[in-house]
Amino acid sequence: MGLWVIIRRRWRMLLWVAVLALVAFNAAIFLGVTGPRVREELRRTDDSPHLQVSRKRLNKSAANSSIQNNDDHEPKGGVVDPEVGVRSNKKFSATPAAEAEVKDNHPNGGEDDPESTRGKKIRGDKNTYRDKEVDEDPVEGQQPLVVKEEADHQFVAPRQGRGHGGRANYTITEVDSFVEKFQSRYADSAYEADVDTKYQDFLKRLNALKKKGSRLDSYINNMGKYSWEHFHHGIRQYHLYDPAEGYVEALLKDMATKEIVDVEQKEGGTQIKLMITLEDDGQSLMKPMRFPRDQETLPDHFYFADYERHNAEIAAFHLDMLLGFYRVPPTIGREVNVSRDLHRLANRKLAKTFFISPAGNWCFHGSCSYYCDSSHPICGHPIMLEGSLAAFLPPLKMAKRKTWRNPWKRSYSKHRKAYWEVYDDLCEKVKDKHPYNEGRRLLDIMDMAVFDFLTGNLDRHHYETFQNFGNDTFLLHLDNGRAFGKSNYDCVSCIAPVRQCCMIRLSTLTKLIKLYVGPDSLSQLMRLSLQFDPLNPILYDPHLDALDRRVSKVLHLINSCLMEGKPWDEVIVDDGIT
Ligand SMILES: Nc1ncnc2c1ncn2[C@@H]1O[C@H](COP(=O)(O)OP(=O)(O)OP(=O)(O)O)[C@@H](O)[C@H]1O
Ligand SMILES: [Mn+2]
């Protein structure tokens, strides 16, 4: 009652007090009084996992604002606060590489997934392997084991007498004797890798043993008439598609030739991607060409600062198919007309980013987290632009996907390394944890590591599965745009899971051995397979050649595990999956 009387009597004064408080609060924000305090708070609690999450959010907004400011070469906003960005006292400018790095812990940790790996798992218990990252500067007196990327191919010798048809140009003496042992062990079995059979016949033999598993529930009675509908109907528990069923070829052809009727920017991920709708209502994900095929990743660039490569997406599809995985969505190259196929169909927001460059080329940049500004234009020559088109997976309302954090995820920071990059015992921890402690999952991770080693893809932060199939299912090999960046460089750390677990699936190993012994080498098979792409040549020779060299290195690694005394059946695991 008393309070009410005071309010009635003094309401004018109280109103003034409120107005003054509001003005003072705004002034405090304006003068940056609160900023240093927040940063100080973050610095003090740097290691709190809870706060790391907010730190990441701050990182995100810092990076976003720097990108907006970065438009037209002018980083108007000045420098990103290094305390907020990374654990470094050095100031850095808002260059794309810096932006990429500020966004430490890549986005897209499960945008589609209610049980997203992001946030929730980052907050996890400190003892889990997931959170451990290690400062690159060793603590005084401690010398962490740093996995060095290997550029040296000394131990891989050119095969005696070239001109042996399609056989690979590489041999390693220890591998030769390992292969002999393998061949005698599996002679006359389905896994036999004899020298005479053509690789495609050998693959057919293995494929005949493939289990298919169930279909996605929503597609059991839903076949449709178009190739993309057959593709969705054809998705099975153990593979994304079956090349023996004619729809894959038809789908590739449709994606390359059918009229484009709609274009949208695809949300999710970091770099620009377009969702292309064709006249048959089929959709595909387009990654535009950003630079020439012969331009390799710059030596001083971190892989996460590299552009995505459209040809890498195409090549990865062919490689995955040759390895009999069938885990990459069918992908094909296509030239589009920037004006007619894109600008004309784009919505206002996207259309606003189109322009004609000083050289007279049709360009655009779209809006996304990295490289979406006029200093990183995507340009036709002068109007035709190459891109990769990957068949769209079923919409999430028809087939939900689950996004999983890769246990061997990198740190996405130039100052810190992931735990597994420094210590070799991650596999011991992973092996005991769900879902890696049962079923096919761990061997699928090994397959993915072999695949990424062959392509040189360091960007495997997450992977996805179809929720409908539970855990007994294959892993989708999506997002291979950062592969094939360095032909003379073998990404040893990409194969760390295999090295640290000393484990590979028998069927995968036998395929690699077959490619090693011939008569067909992987480079030769890839060359032939890629010839069907309208944008051929997709890979230049040094990248094709690197595939053969890497095959021999995987075999060398498996042989080393056996030489260390690990039991054959524990290293080479027969889980019946081909
Ligand atoms: N063929 C596809 N069909 C439907 N969705 C797809 C397809 N390929 C990718 N996606 C979805 O789009 C997301 C982003 O794609 P992708 O990872 O290729 O883009 P990105 O920009 O390279 O991403 P990141 O920055 O995370 O590396 C993926 O996480 C996936 O969920
Ligand atoms: Mn990517």
Image (cartoon, rainbow, N blue to C red):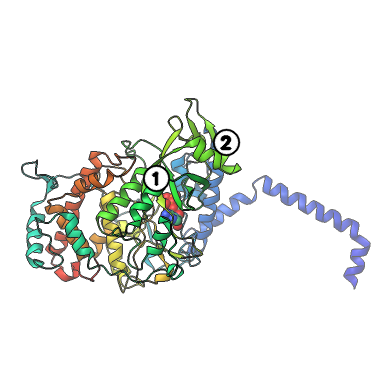
Q: Position of residue 188 (x, y in %)?
A: 9, 67
Badge 1 element: helix
Q: Position of residue 493 (x, y in %)?
A: 28, 53
Badge 2 element: loop
Q: Between residues 124 and 491, which one lies in front from this camera angle?
A: 491
Residue sticking out furthest to the front: 225
Q: Specify whether residue 139 is in view.
A: no
Query: What residue is disc 1 on?
Result: 256
Q: Is residue 300 above or below residue 14?
A: above
Query: What residue is disc 2 on?
Result: 76
Which quadrant does the C terminus fall into?
bottom left
Which quadrant does the N terminus fall into?
bottom right
Q: Position of residue 32 (x, y in %)?
A: 64, 46
Whether label 1 lies within 8 Å of ligand 1 gets the answer no
Within the image, what quadrant is residue 193 found in?
A: bottom left
Q: Specify whether residue 190 is in view.
A: yes
Mark 1 in CB contact with mark 2 (< 8 angstroms)? no
